[in-house]
Amino acid sequence: GQIELIFKAMSSYIEESKHSPMMNDEEREMQESISKCRTPKPMPKINDYGALSIEVNDLTFTYDSRKGKRILKNLNLNLETGSRCLLIGANGSGKSTLLRILAGRHLSSPDGNVKVLGLNAFRDTKLNFHRAYLDCDWGMRTVAFAGCGVPLMADIPVYKMMERLQQTYPERRDELVELLGIDLRWRMHQLSDGQRRRVQLLIGLIRPFKVLLLDEITTSLDVCVRQDLLKWLVKETEQRQVTVIYATHIFDGLDDWATHLHYLTDEGSCGWQGRLAALPKYQQLKEENHPAKMLAIADHWLRRELENNRQRSKFEKAGGALAHELDPSDRNGGYASGRNIKIKSNNDGGTAT
């Protein structure tokens, strides 16, 4: 269609411009690089995994360095293919840990209670060809290009970043370059944080995926690029049935973006999960024509957490139970001298003791 015509026109222009006396060596090298096309290697096939692309069943996770403190507690999460799930929670609630487990960066348990596309999230390496994970660490680590490790701040142009990958998916690369407003001549050591984030997205999204995990990836983007990216993700889920899980604290433009919502409490447990349309608070705000529905929902939940924590703190200062005694099951095999305290529930309505 139109993309093929554009690509042919670009190829013709590139061939003509190679011999132009106005083009310097660097520009000629870039044009030769982006004009090359490589045939994608066949990706490992994944057997039919049914309607669910994400399955998390009764997940509990602890870091060894945290001395037994549970980061995630009895967590369940099931997402259908083509879902767009917004992951909400306070700092330290376990959002990044959950995404890293789904990305295969942490081994959760040997019994396979975390599955992506029907496969063990950690053990099955075929997932690396069908799953993409992007977080904020990219700007502080190293990346690879053409098989060689180089510092992100090195004096290297964007068209050299993962050059073979760009040449394997030229149409998708060109689409993302336009979407993210990237100049392939940019040199990495001269870029701002926001521009480096755009390059990270370009490299991370070029290869087609079936599951996309995003952890605070849009924090440095300007509002226009961010909105265009969100629209592009909607297209990916609707046209290619991609499943997206997006953890963020920035809620503008997200009122009607998500199909699902998952709220992690500050204790690492599930405060609410399901289809966004099934959340009573969302329906109420929608009927009221609230201008920032997702922000209002997040503010409602997180402020309630803050109030609960203040009540706990006052109770302890008044001579009540220590923090680790509030849940007797957390110590001495469940026989600790825990004391009851009335607090507001993390669920909608009711109280907990």
Image (cartoon, grey):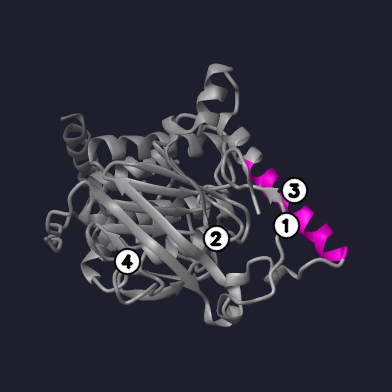
Cα distance in 3D space between marks 4 and 3: 33 Å
Residue 26 picture location, percent across and down = 38, 58
User: Which disc is residue 268 wearing?
Assistant: 2
Name the kind of residue labelled 4 in the image: Asn
In the displayed structure, would residue 201 be above or below residue 317? above
Kindly state the secondary structure of the residue where label 3 is placed.
helix
Residue bearing mark 1: 341
Residue bearing mark 4: 113
Residue 330 picture location, percent across and down = 59, 73
Judge depth for marks 1 and 4 and give the one in front: 1
- Neighbor class of circle 2 (other Cα within 10 Å; few <14, some 14-19, many 20+) is many
Give the residues drawn in magenta, as a range: 301-318
Q: Earlier in the sequence, mark 4 or mark 3?
A: 4
Which residue is drawn at the image coordinates 21% and 39% (left, top)? 7
Look at the numbered discs 2 and 4 and tell me whether their residues touch, using CB distance below 8 Å: no
Q: Is residue 75 left or right of residue 216?
A: left
Front position in the image: 65 or 325: 325
Judge depth for marks 2 and 1 and give the one in front: 1
